[in-house]
Image (cartoon, rainbow, N blue to C red):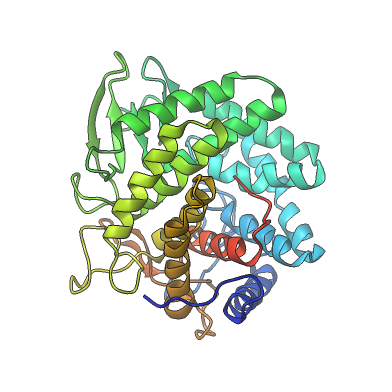
Amino acid sequence: MTAIDLRPGAEATGSAVAAALRTIDANIAEFGDRYPGDTTAHGRYGLRPAGGGLPEGANQGWTTSFWPGMLWLAYELTGDETYLRAATAHVRGFTDRVEGGIDVETHDLGFLYTLSCVLPWRTSADRTARGAALAAADRLLTRVLEPAGIIQAWGDMSDPRQRGRTIIDSLMNTPLLFWASETSGEPRYAEVARRHIAQLRDHILRPDDTTFHTFYWDPRTGEPLRGETEQGHSDESCWARGQAWGIYGFALNHRHTGDASLLDASRRCADYFLAHLPADGVCYWDLEFTDGSGEPRDSSAAAIAASGLIELADALPDGGERYRAAAARILGSLIERYSTAGHPGSNALILHGVYDKPKNVGVDEGNLWGDYFYLEALTRFARPDWPHHW
Ligand code: GLY
């Protein structure tokens, strides 16, 4: 793997940031306060397709907040208020979404409302944004299943296929609950988050340091039942993006709780992930695959891992140099081999991600979360005093 100089002010950092900002500028003109699709098609985002009674470009699905999330990063990198205005323009749409109950039957309310509404509250004391983010946290509490104490991931709470099921990605949704407790003074949000995270630590993380993508609990007794994949290669394999969510998510929840077992869980996920990388440091879509497999990469998993490894390194008493260096190698490879700097036809930041290989959705394309976490990782290098989002 190449090691390029990613220190603040280094040429590689500056030119990667400048290339990303040029793409974001063009996307502000193209999308404004509407939303691109989850993934590119042939390297380009179009408007989010119409569906569920909503028009093209509407705020639905789990990925829309990554677009304002990128605008926040652009503002934090430059101080340019054009980005601040573009980012805060999304508060109205996210408020309408939660107030109208539009596509909110999901645990992804954490991804959605942390980036779209908690950030404007923190930055500009926007009370509308605070109200919307608290309403989203309240919605998340309606997904808790007792006696397991888990937050059901997907679908209607009475859907037999989804009942009692949670997924590794949910670790990124619990920061909304910690924020809700902090801002409201009500401990009940954080208590739900703590129980949910402990269940994931004990059951979704396997003894060999790999992770299940999803896990079922008996909704009546609370008994842990079984792991099952949804987007990975098999129930037993280790889906690369899930492992990356584990690195980042466990470290984030350690940040909010100080619970050392969560830092250890993040480290275990990281050690396995790093031991299963191919030569260029950008993982294949399932860690079962490596060079010569002919399978596609998932650049989005690499971007999540790069930012998560810095989160982990920052929390370690010894400074976590090994994880910081691994993050730099992965990010350097994304910049050199996967970014769109040399692809003027693309409006993504990085290419060669995978959304859902088993269903053949967004395979070998750019995607919104890959772009967001690529820019977030880059921002962590370019601006070590970056105001944390999660
Ligand atoms: N959170 C859904 C995914 O990673 O695809």
Task: Report whether 221 appears left or right of 47.
Answer: left
- Whole-percent x, y for residue 139 in the image: 56, 28
Count of labels in the image? 0
Whether 138 is drawn above or below 173: the answer is above
- Along the line of sight, which residue is nearer the eye, 13 or 225? 13
- Along the line of sight, which residue is nearer the eye, 361 or 226? 226
Q: Quadrant of the N terminus?
A: bottom left
Q: Residue at x 32, y 55 (%)?
A: 273
- Whole-percent x, y for residue 297 in the image: 32, 68
Q: Is residue 91 visible?
A: yes
- Whole-percent x, y for residue 385 in the image: 68, 56
In the displayed orientation, state which residue is furthest to the front. Answer: 318
Whether 373 is drawn above or below 264: the answer is below
Task: Report whether 24 appears left or right of 245.
Answer: right
- Whole-percent x, y for residue 289 in the image: 21, 63
Q: Residue at x 53, y 32 (%)?
A: 258
Which image quarter: residue 67?
A: bottom right
Q: Is residue 99 visible?
A: no
Q: Residue at x 64, y 49 (%)?
A: 388
Q: Quadrant of the C terminus?
A: top right
